[in-house]
Image (tube, grey):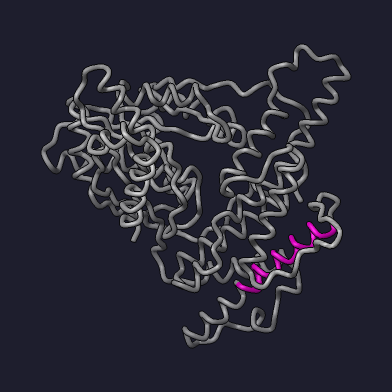
Amino acid sequence: MPRAGILAAQPALRFIPPQYSRWVHRLCRAALPMLLRSRGLVRFETSGSESLAALFAEAQSGRSRLLIAFRHPSTTDPLVMAQLLWREVPRAARAAGLSLKAPVHSQFLYDRGIPLWAGEAAGWILSKLGGIPIQRGKLDRLALKTARNLFAHGPFPLAIAPEGATNNHGELLSPLEPGLAQMAFWCCEDLAAAGRHERVLIVPIGLQYLSTSDDWGPIDRLLGCLEDLLGPSTTSPMAASPLPADPDQAQQQRYQRLIALSERLLSLLEGFYQRSDCAPWTPAGEECAPAADFLERLSRLREQALAVAEAHFQLSPRGSVSERCRRIEQAGWACIYRDDLDDLSEVERCLVDWSAREADIRMGHMRLVEHFATVSGSYVVEKPSIDRYGEVLMILWRAIAWIRGREGDRPPALGPWRVRMVVAEPIDVGESSTAYRRDRRGAVEKLTAELRQRLEAAIG
């Protein structure tokens, strides 16, 4: 497992207020083509940019407030959304004869953890672009209050990824968090309280990354690289032999190698938890029966890893995997980032530093689960495309890099990629406001379900 990255307790995490700067926006806009090329993105296919331009024109005229709900399959998504808003929408507006006031932009929610791993400079840039940091594992009242105010009264639309985190799958939608629908209803209430009559619209945006080539060479090289990292028991005569000339036979061999890789990594992790002192305690006479299949074994591994972290932080195992991960993260941050450091004696500070290192190690078990949170076991076999192979292999590569303590390594290049962006039909939230007043939870669930349907259609 990875070494602890935290050596001492840190000052408490401060809220980074959004401070939009037009000149920083201009610099980022100028750098965007270079950043996109560095990620291997060479072509952008946009459907519905004309309708999004019309929606921006309506919002700029004071007739609506826009909440942009975008899919979040990759950490590259912010760059793609910037391409959509900064370049594709103005281009579509000009083609349609619409006059949009510059800049065409949105403010956005982002995970407060990003500046912790990407650096303070990333936090500064996100702030200057109007980003609002939110701590996902708790009720972050300041972040929600700021986002709510900017949504109703700010100069730009608000953008949120309703999946809450990247899921690394182009054709698989993660469960949606209810916060986006709640934010939309809050905006309706705020506008009504101010005597304003703008429409509140949710605009679903589908994002997908698709290979521009039918060359399986990068996929096969990555398979070989992972086989080398996982050891000789992964390698079989089938893996060592050249791929058959027949495409169907080659695909079968490739899939068997992927299965062997996944089984090997799962077996190594199972062995780690069985041998480790941190393995969850099982009462006498209650030994777990052997798991029957891969998915059951993977589910049990997730449960073991989460149980280790939850036991350390004295958390109850309730909610979805994502919700449990967020609570563990917040409990770990509470040990690491503290507001009482100046009041501690030297010995107290040493103990707090020790606690911070322990918390960081225990959070590592949760990070491991995050890497496999979206693995379904059937994604590739349902559609054995280059894109799906690439997505699953990259999940394995990132997990292995993280276990090796090499998460900063640049991922293997499987591109170049084309990006498909689909602007779906907007949802008028005002039509559900009456139902919201009668049954808030039911209305939020219904609106979230409707958003899910439109996002699924956008990537279908």
Spot occupied by residue 37 in the image (x, y as percentages of width and height): 43, 48
Q: Residue at x 59, y 66 (%)?
A: 222
Q: Residue furthest left?
A: 97
Q: Nearer the viewer, residue 383 or 141?
A: 141
Question: Which residue sits furthest front?
Answer: 438
The part of the image, by quadrant, that contains residue 81 is: top left
298 vs 440, left or right, is right
Q: Is residue 323 above or below residue 172?
A: above
Q: Quadrant of the C terminus?
A: bottom left
User: Whole-percent x and y of residue 369?
Assistant: 64, 51
Residue 227 included in the magenta stretch of the image: no
Is 13 displayed left or right of 280 in the figure? left
Identify the main secondary structure in magenta: helix
Q: In the rendered image, which quarter is residue 65 located in?
A: top left
Q: Is residue 168 left or right of residue 50?
A: right
Nearest the eye: 156 or 35: 156
Residue 32 percent coordinates (x, y)? 39, 39
Give whichever of 196, 14 is nearer the camera. 196
